Amino acid sequence: MALQAGGDRTVKDLSTSSTPSLTPPLTEEELPDWLRLLRSRRVGVTTFYRLLTEHGSARAALAALPEVARAAGVDDYAPCPPEVALAEIEGGRRAGARLVAIGTPGYPTLLAETPEAPPLLWVMGDTALLARPTVALVGARNASSLGLRMARKLAADLSEAGVVVVSGLARGIDTEAHRASLARGTVAVMAGGVDAIYPPENAVLAQEIAEKGLRLSEEPMHLTPQARHFPRRNRIIAGLVQALVVVEAATKSGSLITARAALDLGRDVLAVPGHPFDARAAGCNMLIRDGAALVRGSRDVFEALALPARPVADAERDAAAAPETPIPAAAAERRTLKETAALHGEILSRLGPSPLAEDQLIRDLGRPASAVTPELVTLELEGRIERQPGGLLTRAS
């Protein structure tokens, strides 16, 4: 593909050498030294590996670090204190997480083969899942109803065929991908600490993933994610998988950062096409233009990975909705103006230039038809949505 990905680094390294082979920590005493070295100021992944190679052990590297920093123009340098590393390890133990070092059992094999693989990962759940074929599903947080349905269908089909679905636990496409593949095991890569759930509304889902699947992160325990952490998270998603599928993405989005990272690693990149007028599909359409495989349904993903697909119907059914959610029984609703505005926002966020059936929209919203239908009329009169033949709705351009 023609795209080029640039690394988004948030820590200023003392060196820029490549990742060497190394001997993993062999004892419980060595693991805190690895963590201290990795958490030391200005020590990124590249510098971590260089120091280990030059000094033979994390403890020796820690002793040499102040002089290394001084040579790089940094005075009064002190490595991460032992008590900080021990407190993080204890915090992980209390949270039910464990620390896995590169080169030891439980560390993802595909990720270990990538440049600048994280030396240490915090994990919660079943690391054996990563021995199975893996595919990442990523996309927009403000996904359309059609995009969410596509993510559910792809994730369910992949999971049923024995493929582990990897995503980032974000709103929208990520959430639907995790939910649809939860029963057979899904992997959530966290932008903050492995115990720091973001967004908060995914707390229950995150707990279920820890019980049935796997959560992992390279960041310190308890760390609340910030914007700069997400590109780092995205490179791990790309490193864990054989292929990446982008369901919906704007031209400037985290999903495209993940796609560029996947391209740099030689992973297969696939994308679901969308309506040219829908900004949420612009990134996917751009990827397809530049050579990404077009995805109409799960069969296309199986073919790209040369995996046997489970028996599915033709492409039209393959891209259809997951099993429909029953419409709740009608009930009288009294809403404030704020609640009505919120419902309007939900409706508009689900619609785009591609027509969507009114009854499907109501199911996707999970509200009674008696509550949604009057608001559709209101939005139509305001010129914010348009009604097409056959009971189809689109968002007004």
Image (cartoon, helix red, strand yellow):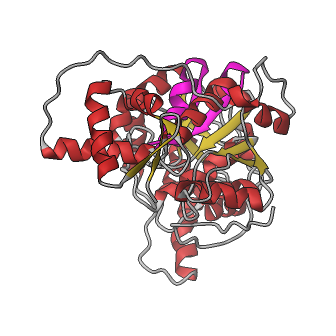
Q: Give x and y (percent) for residue 124.
A: 50, 30
Q: Residue furthest bottom?
A: 73
Q: Is residue 321 left or right of residue 297?
A: left
Residue depicted at x 40% and y 37% = 195
- Across and down, in percent, residue 20 comes to 76, 57
Q: Is residue 328 above or below residue 276?
A: above
Residue furthest out toward the right: 306
Q: Is residue 118 visible?
A: no
Quarter holding the N terminus is: bottom right
**Residue in the picture at 32% in, 26% down:** 369
Residue sitting nearer the eye, 40 or 252: 252
Image position of 312 (left or right of 249):
right
- Please tell me whether residue 162 belongs to the stretch shown in magenta: yes
Residue 301, position in %: x, y?
A: 77, 36
Q: Nearer the viewer, residue 284 or 82?
A: 284
x 68%, y 63%: residue? 50
Whether residue 63 is visible here, answered yes or no, is yes
Indicate whether residue 35 is drawn in magenta: no
Foreground residue among 182 and 309: 309
Question: At 58% across and 64% down in the image, what residue appears?
Answer: 251
Q: Position of residue 80 (x, y in %)?
A: 43, 58
Residue stretch rendered in magenta on the structure: 158-186
How many numbered tags mark residues here? 0
Q: In the picture provided, is 281 more to the left or to the right than 370?
A: right
